[in-house]
Amino acid sequence: MTPLRLLPNRDKQLLPQRLRWGALPRTLALALAIVLSACAQRGVETPALASIDASKWSGQQNGFKDRIQSALTSQAPSPASELQASNWWGLLGNPQLSALVLKAQEHNPSLSLAKTRIDKAQALAGLSKSSTQAQLDAGLDVSRQLYSQTGIFPPPIAGNMINSGNLQAAVNWNPDLMGTRAAQLRAAIGEVKAQEAQTHYAQLQLATQVTLTFINLASWVDQLDCAQEQLALQRESVALLSERVQRGLDNRIELTLAQSDLKDRESFINYIEDQVRIAQHQLALLSAQDPMELEHLNPHLQSLKTPQWSTPIGLNLLAQRADLRAAQWRVQASLGQLESAKLDFYPNVNLGLFAGYNSINLNQLLQGRSIQYGLAPSVRLPIFDGGRLRAQLLVKESERDSAIAQYNETLLEAVKECANALSEIQSLVPQLQQTTESLGLSRQAQALASERAEHGLSNLQPLLAAKRASLTKAQALLTLEAKQLSAHVTLINALGGGYNDPTAIALQSK
């Protein structure tokens, strides 16, 4: 592209004569004819995989909404709050839980890794965008060379040490007439959006895991309290039986069985204490703390409220899930890459302009007669490529179908998670009611046994048995309450945790 003034005698130049401007229209016409007739053949286009449209499922638009609404309002003693992605865990009303979730999201390494993926995707998008802009380059090349006496250069260059230089600025611009760069940019932006949505999904999963672990810890702490009360009752029962055996009122069979039951309860308490420590360690690790840092944490289920929230409800709420948004954006990215692969079959036009100084003698580099400039347009035509472009197109079509299949799978998994959470919440309602009634009857029996013991109508054994039964019912109720809290958290997670992507676009496959 850079002409050199090689010979001192311009009349004896061996270089071709410059193209006359009168020949330019004929040259452009010939180039256009080649462009229109000499492109590689793309072949038959493969149809896209069909995506699932859940909005058309029969009975879902109303039935699904009613089921969620019923689950949210079945036990709503207070007005519902709005579900927000930034603090949905605050609906449980526990400051310790909120602090742990925020700490986990601030220091968890998996979220840091997800954020680095966003940075990488944004950098790639910037790289794609820069390819659509004009590029300006400037450079200075200097050389000192001994030219051969038998080479192509005659004297006075031949046989001498010559200092030469080239100072030049060049502008290159790809006008993207076919839209290839624009398609690549759309694909890069789609990948950025997908990574952003995936990071929100990772945050939701981390917050959900911390919340469920916290509920599990509170359940074990309450179970430990009940187990310690039962252990105290069993020790009292063993003491009474031992006294009766010594007086000859009872045989040792019942005493031995009571002592065996005492050992079992002591062993069970050790097991519960171990589960409490495991939950504490897990919470510490989730929040990037020392495993022993939270061994003082002993929450109770009473400190947690059943989440009550209001939001637009239905399958449209499922569509707000961050993982579904990520899948949609990946489909969009794959469509952009596919469009770029299709446009690779068409010509690529590049416009170049250069200007600067060039001289075989460095002392004359900046003189006026050393000025050079030129226009360097270029056209690249894919004619015979050995099937490379066709194979590349097939790869992008396969990636498009893979992205659509991943979206379909994510959608079905989301619906399954939501349906399972709803079923669990609805099944727990009668269980909680029946267990609460059973506990009430057991406490009535305990009160009657206490009254009989106070009046001397029976010994303390029936009263101790009634107390143990009440504690057993209380343990069962604690288990159901923990399950109810976990099911509501799981439902929030299944419905996206309040995440909303205002820039998300509907899935469109061509």
Image (spheres, grey):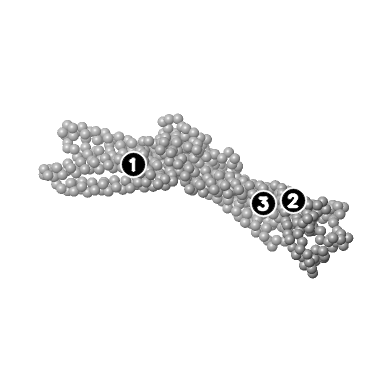
Compare residues 218 and 416 and report the one nearer the observer. Answer: 218
Task: Tell me the element at label 1.
Answer: helix
- The circle on residue 66 is none
Q: Quadrant of residue 439?
A: top left
Residue 424 seen in the current view = no
- The circle on residue 221 is 1
x 47%, y 34%: residue: 309
Nearest to N terminus: mark 2 or mark 1: 2
Q: Quadrant of residue 224?
A: top left
Q: Are marks 3 and 1 in contact (CB under 8 Å)?
A: no
x 54%, y 42%: residue: 319
Relative to 187, is 375 on the left or the right?
Answer: right
Nearest to N terminus: mark 3 or mark 1: 1
Relative to 130, is 230 on the left or the right?
Answer: left
Q: CA distance from mark 2 to mark 3?
A: 31 Å
Relative to 352, is 256 on the left or the right?
Answer: left
Q: Quadrant of residue 302?
A: top left
Residue that mark 3 sits on: 340
Q: Nearer the viewer, mark 2 or mark 1?
A: 2
